[in-house]
Amino acid sequence: MRPVEIKKDIWWVGVVDWNKRSFHGYSQSPLGTTYNNYLITDEKTVLVDTVDQEFAGRMFCNIAHVLQGKKIDYFVINHLEPDHAGSLAQAVERYKPEKIFTSPMGEKALRAHFHNSADWPVEVVPSGKSLSIGKRTLTFVETRMLHWPDSMLTYVAEDKLAFTNDAFGQNIASSERFADEIDRSVLRRAMAEYYANIVLPYSPVVLKTLEAVAAMGLELDTLCPDHGLIWRGAAEVRYVLEAYREFALQRPQPKAVIAYDTMWHSTEKMAEAIADGLVAEGISVKVMSLKANHHSQVMTELFDAAALIVGSPTHNNGILPLVANLLTYVKGLRPQNKLAAAFGSFGWSGECVKILSEALTGMNMELVEPAVKTKFVPTHEALGQCVELGKKIGQAIKAKTGN
């Protein structure tokens, strides 16, 4: 993709990764992604972030289209994760900037990532520091743990624009550069998927950051994230800020997710019977086999759900590996305000339900009991117990959500 002028003399010079399907090795990105970085041409020319090292050549080509032989004076590095700073060493060698601006924690991360950076002209900018580049002034605002310690945003007052690194992004590969150019439902789904699998553990920081930005009185009509589409116009900025506030508050909807793995279909039959009980109570339910659904897909569905119901047969006195993987993944993302329940089948030892229940309560989820387990193939009576468990969870969901 060729560079795109966002506002006069402010350019997108990033790349589109059409083929990306595994994001950082732990989450799926079914729509691909972009690595966004930006160039400001003023009295001082400023490069904001870089791209994944694999795409450095495309970035340099885009920059050349804009520069037309001019030099780059300054780099601003908002975030040191390799998909945004992977090309930094090559860019330093190519452009030889006068200064490289980054946050206090960013300087530490930079030194740890780039062991040849001792002679780089790095300048640390604390939160609130401003820098004149000619007609424009850049103001740096630390956003620690949104979602790395080094994270900061860079605000351009004259253009009412902020470069926000990973905040407010989505994993979408497209020929369009702006959020208002694509279907809103597709965009909202991608936003939720991104938040649920990347930003969710830092929801308290999101709320504090939104409060801090409001208190600073920054005028904003453009937000430029490092992944996905750019938000332009005051209405679009309000939309994404409010969406992030809603996401961070984690208010559950009348919805349940049943995630399970099965060996000889017994646990699968139990999952479907529990779903019947939930539906009987008017609750929306997603039944997700872990053989068919990646753990990040389950997390995306769980994000706005009121309950997580997990099932596994007993396997070697434990649970099946895909279920253990899901529980580890969900625990790390720390979802809040969830009900939970466990179920499973067994042949001769039967530890599955105990293990699942302990894992769910260990995530501070409110357990709905009694759990259901059955030996070998579930009987009609056992499936009836599953239906009743589903109904009981459904009633608890309605009480919790006020529906």
Image (tube, rainbow, N blue to C red):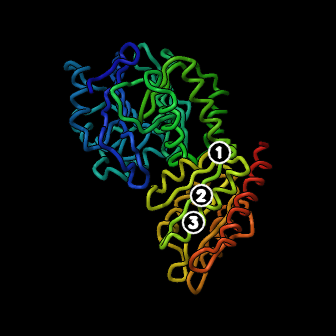
In the foreground, 332 or 360: 360
Q: Earlier in the sequence, mark 1 or mark 2?
A: 1
Q: What quarter of the picture does the N terminus occupy?
A: top left
What residue is shown with label 2? 258
Residue at 36 percent across and 15 percent down: it is 9
Q: Nearer the viewer, mark 1 or mark 2?
A: 2
Graded by Cα atoms within 10 Å as few (under 14), some (14 to 19) or many (20 or more), the crowding at tag 1 reads few
Q: Give the CA distance from mark 3 to mark 1.
A: 39 Å
Residue 117 seen anywhere in this rendered image of the structure = yes
Q: Which mark is residue 269?
A: 3
Q: Earlier in the sequence, mark 3 or mark 1?
A: 1
Residue at 27 percent across and 50 percent down: it is 116
Question: So how many labels did they put on this image?
Answer: 3
Q: Give the CA distance from mark 1 to mark 2.
A: 27 Å
- In the image, residue 306 sits, relative to residue 72, either above or below, namely below
Residue at 47 percent across and 66 percent down: it is 322
Q: Position of residue 7 (x, y in %)?
A: 41, 15
Graded by Cα atoms within 10 Å as few (under 14), some (14 to 19) or many (20 or more), the crowding at tag 2 reads many
What residue is shown with label 1? 204
Type of amino acid at the residue the image marks with label 1: Pro
Q: What quarter of the picture does the C terminus occupy?
A: top right
In the foreground, 340 or 142: 340
Graded by Cα atoms within 10 Å as few (under 14), some (14 to 19) or many (20 or more), the crowding at tag 3 reads some
Type of amino acid at the residue the image marks with label 2: Ile
Helix, strand or loop at disc 3? helix
Q: Earlier in the sequence, mark 3 or mark 2?
A: 2
Determine contact: label 1, label 2, CB under 8 Å.
no
